[in-house]
Image (tube, rainbow, N blue to C red):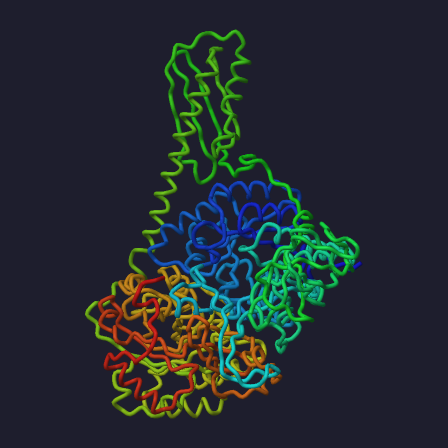
Amino acid sequence: MNTVKNHSASGGRIELLAPAGGVDAGYAALHFGADAIYLGLKRFSARAEAVNLSAEELSEIVAYAHSLTPRRRVFVTINTLVLNHELRDLVEVLDAAASCDVDALIVQDLGVARIAQDHFPNLSLHGSTQMAIHNVQGAKVLRELGFRRVTLARELTIEEIAEIVSGSGIQVEVFIHGALCYSYSGLCLFSSQLRQRSGNRGRCTYPCRDAFRSESDFEGKGGTRERYAFPFSMKDLALPEHIESLRDAGVASLKIEGRMKSPLYVAATTKLYRGILDGKFGNAERVEIEDDIRTIFSRPWTKLYVSSRLDRDVVDSETVGHRGTRIGLVEAVIEGPPDKLRFKTSRAIEKHDGIQIDLPEQGKPYGFAVDRFGYGSVSSATEAPAGSVVEIRLPADHPELPVGAAVYCSSSQVAKQRYKYDRPKPGEFKVRNVVDICATLEKEKLTIIISPRGDLALCGVTKEFKGDFEQSRDPKATEEAFRSAFSKLGDTNLELGTAEFRNPYGLFVPVSRLNTWRREMCKELEDGIEVAKRRHADRIAEKYQGPTPFGAAKRDAGLTWSVKTDRLSHLSGFLADDWAGIAEAVVDIGSEAAESLLAGLEELESSVGRDRIRLALPIITRRWETLDVQAKIKRLLGDGWTNWEAGNLSAWEFLKNIIGGKGLPPSTSHEGDGGTQSFASDLHVTADWSLNVFNRAAILELRQLGARRFVLSPEDGIENMTVLAERLGEKVTAVVYQDTPLFISESCHKANLKGCKRKGDDCAQREEPMRLVSSGGDEVLIVNRGCRAITIGAKPFCVAGHIKKLMAAGITSVRADFVWRSYSAQEVVEIWRLLRCGAEIRGTHKANVLRGLM
């Protein structure tokens, strides 16, 4: 029997965290041993198409979870990007979570974090994997911003996870099972840019599961030909073999993905990992549960990069969707009618089970339900044991099934019956507001005061009820009747705390009148609480609709331009006229070798001056890249470079670490800037679009770090940009030309499609990009950067033809990005001149900025 200790190296019991797309999945998870569940509400959930929960359902499941022994925890996911006009609705959602006493919020948007910390301090903050935190530096920044826990990017190795645990001072949560995104979560813009539905807003169209065509040759597939495959369709993560190493690494929470999955799936996966953690079963039972999970829903399993970043068995490029558990190989198709499928099954099967057969040329398996079948001497069976050679009747329209094709059980009646769970009666559990009641009975009136505890105390209700009250035969019974009447709060959101009944004259009150008055007062109290909450939400939202620290924007300001590149050769063709009027040139320091970078910066400085050059830190800096990036930062800071750009939260820790910062000290005002600089008064840091500034609360949170200007996301819409520009003016920049990274992935496209065996530094850094076309017509290019695959549109994003519309919205600063694509210097010059003339680059795609589709 395999036993895994329940306590991590960092101390404390390891938490098993399970998904709850609906209340039934939540109860299933708790029944089968989840220490905590995470769920979404009807708004601001990254799984918007999940069932999600109402406020009433949240109250019910929180109360139930907290009633269990040991007490279980409930986390609410508010892990989408929030537009500024949605802040009012967001506050109501936060209030509902706080009122239900949830144990934590899982957030992506820094604005959500800011509002929660300012106004709902009882809510702990967990950083969502959508934040793409992938190194110690990023985790440290989250801790300094008040987060208690971070859910790390899924792409990390066990060594990186252990390093973050030991070096960040924040709880670490990792995914151990479930579906995987091809891109770093939170950095996928494919659905948004090409299909106008944002994954960061919970509306992903799952382009990574689409079929794509390339005219490149596919090794082992018959030479060069045109065919469709699934180069981005990740296998499912499954780490049952690595629970012990994660425990040793000090991980605080093990997370199962699956808010779109059924309660049956949640029950089985929770039981599997609970059993592994507790050492409850041997290998045979574990294999049985793993097979059950595969029949419920599963793609092929992968351990991703937990053992090595160079692992390549992560994508199922031949088949998409649910596969099942493999139970045999096609031995023959016996001609009928009806035709029958013959194979030897390694798993017991029965009538109504699902069968799927691999048909790689079709891109998905062929499936059907078991209806009539036989085995051995049994010609018509309802079930057959493992090891039987079965003959199953095929549907009349079945495709050709090749001998040797894999056969899977894709639905199991046994599995459906094996995972029963308890669910409380509706209304049995509810998070309630505790109220204290004090009543004074006099000869001509009964005065009742109902006082909520805590923050709702001001909502208390006092009522006087007139009457000619008679002498009671049994004053004690009258007191008991009062207490009984006012304890009947089951149909309300109230719970009786203390009840004091003063009856100095020994009078009598009919129970019927007490019940009536109780109902009246409780309704008035609950209505008052709702009104108070709405007013409170209005006041909070107004705070972020008002002036920002920057003051009013200058509406008559002219337009300024900037340019960004990841290789200085792109700008080598600029002449003096091209540099005229440019506010700054932004240079990503991650791509070029140090000496080449320094030489190029020196040359650029001679053209535009140092004060107009900004150095950008990479969006992704993994463990093996850290020393190089740190060395460049140290050299550049030492040489006096003060203008920097952050593409990830980790940027501030990288800079602070080099200059010897000690955390986030009290803010220091800067004249003319209206904000703060947290760690170095002589550095000027801007936040790039990948930090997702969609609301003023997010701006305030980044200001706490010292960000002085903000580049708006290419996902944003014109209406929201107008709101942000109204007060920020020149402090915000809109990107008007860009090869937006649709995917940023550690999964090598060459390995996925061609079995490429080159790894890491062996990859050519500047090889030609691969062109792919989806079955729906999306054309993309995949750029290789040392086995990191960056997918960009075949045509760049460009809205330069709508400069006047942007200016009317209050945008006074725009930028053109020449990043990822291998431009020639001449191409950059030609495009740059067209952009500055307000020309739309022919054939480019336009994203949400024009349509307001966010």
Along the line of sight, which residue is nearer the eye, 226 or 804? 226
Which residue occupies 56% across, 51% down? 20
Does 254 sit above or below residue 424? below
In the displayed structure, does residue 28 sit left or right of residue 94? Answer: right
In the displayed structure, does residue 125 sit left or right of residue 703? Answer: right
Which residue occupies 61% across, 81% down? 755
Along the line of sight, which residue is nearer the eye, 153 or 560? 153
- Tell me residue 436's x, y (percent): 49, 29
- Tell me, yes or no, if residue 172 can be seen here: no
Along the line of sight, which residue is nearer the eye, 682 or 317? 317
Where on the picture, by quarter, is residue 622?
bottom right
- Tell me residue 289's x, y (percent): 70, 56
- Tell me residue 801's x, y (percent): 25, 75
Does 547 sit above or below residue 70? below
Q: Residue furthest front?
A: 337
Along the line of sight, which residue is nearer the eye, 356 or 54? 356
